[in-house]
Image (tube, rainbow, N blue to C red):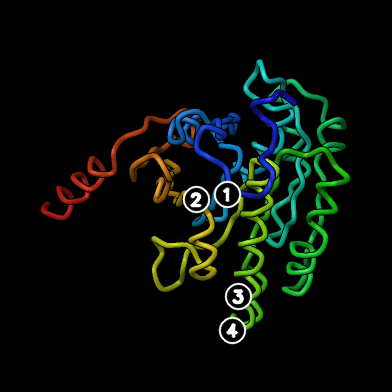
């Protein structure tokens, strides 16, 4: 590990101690939106269409490529409450990136939750042990509130989601992790993530993912440095062009006038 990538210890730090480290996600549209890729030390909250987990799988494989190829040569730990793992897709992505599928599978550590209690236990009590055992720089917590929602989200559930969100944010900063969390879009407000205020607050980066028959659109809804903006990619072409949000809004206004 290079000195510039050494995780920060807990405590007070001045701004000169921080240095941005990014890893390519494997999705050009996302890398363009984030000006280089997923950033270490920040929690990236993805919400919206379930197909966003395809991008998570791609990053889990991309992270294992060499730094020369935009990866970080790191295993990935996944706490999965969304049942997002597709072995056949991981195999395809491995071949696509010139990696051996068996080697890739050996470096993706998956623990599955089947109810909200398991989600809470894995995140609060076991996640740190996983990271102490596996030299992983990538952490994915998929469908963080999903099982709570299925079981009926109440006050106690929101409190537990709050605890998990704070834990994930703290360990991400302390260890300099590349962290991705997925949640559904809010049923009341589809332009916002589900899961409560603390989850939204502790995640420094918000990316909304929406899908149409011809393209996938990524909206950067929150970032500590960058403005709100969108990028999209054709389903037949993985590249994307980043445009300011105002460009899309003008287009929507013209359509409504017509």
Q: Separation of disc 2 and disc 3 at Cα?
A: 23 Å
Q: Which residue is mark 3?
A: 149
Q: Answer with mark 4 or mark 1, whichever residue precedes in sequence.
A: 1
Q: Residue at x 74, y 47 (%)?
A: 86
Q: Residue 204 has which mark?
A: 2
Front residue of 184 and 175: 175
Q: Which quadrant would the N terminus be assigned to in this image? A: top right
Q: Residue 18 has which mark?
A: none
Q: Nearer the viewer, mark 2 or mark 3?
A: 2
Q: Nearer the viewer, mark 3 or mark 4?
A: 4
Label 3 environment density (alpha carbons within 10 Å; few <14, some 14–19, many ≥20): some
Q: Quadrant of residue 224?
A: top left
x, y percent for residue 18: 55, 34
Considering the numbered disc 1 on the image, is that residue within a helix, a strand or a loop?
A: strand
x, y percent for residue 221: 39, 50
Q: Which residue is mark 4?
A: 154
Q: Which residue is mark 1?
A: 43
x, y percent for residue 21: 58, 30
């Amino acid at each position: 590990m290079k000195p510039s990538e050494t995780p920060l210890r807990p405590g007070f730090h001045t701004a000169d101690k921080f240095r941005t480290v990014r890893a390519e996600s494997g999705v050009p549209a996302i890398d363009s939106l984030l000006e280089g890729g997923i950033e270490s030390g920040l929690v990236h909250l993805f919400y919206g269409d379930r197909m966003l987990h395809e991008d998570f799988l791609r990053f889990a494989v991309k992270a294992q490529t060499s730094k020369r190829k935009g990866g970080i040569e790191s295993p990935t730990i996944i706490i999965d409450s969304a049942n997002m793992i597709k072995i056949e897709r991981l195999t395809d992505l491995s071949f696509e990136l010139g990696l051996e599928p068996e080697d890739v599978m050996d470096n993706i550590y998956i623990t599955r939750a089947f109810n909200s209690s398991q989600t809470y236990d894995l995140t609060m009590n076991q996640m740190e042990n996983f990271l102490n055992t596996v030299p992983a720089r990538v952490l994915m917590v998929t469908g963080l509130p999903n099982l709570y929602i299925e079981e009926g989200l109440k006050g106690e559930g929101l409190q537990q989601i709050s605890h998990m969100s704070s834990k994930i944010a703290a360990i991400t900063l302390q260890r300099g992790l590349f962290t991705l969390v997925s949640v559904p879009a809010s049923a009341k407000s589809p332009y916002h993530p589900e899961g409560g205020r603390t989850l939204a607050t502790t995640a420094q980066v918000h990316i909304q993912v929406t899908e149409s028959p011809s393209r996938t659109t990524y909206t950067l809804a929150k970032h500590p440095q960058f403005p709100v903006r969108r990028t999209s990619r054709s389903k037949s072409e993985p590249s994307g062009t980043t445009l300011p949000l105002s460009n899309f809004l003008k287009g929507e206004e013209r359509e409504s006038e017509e």
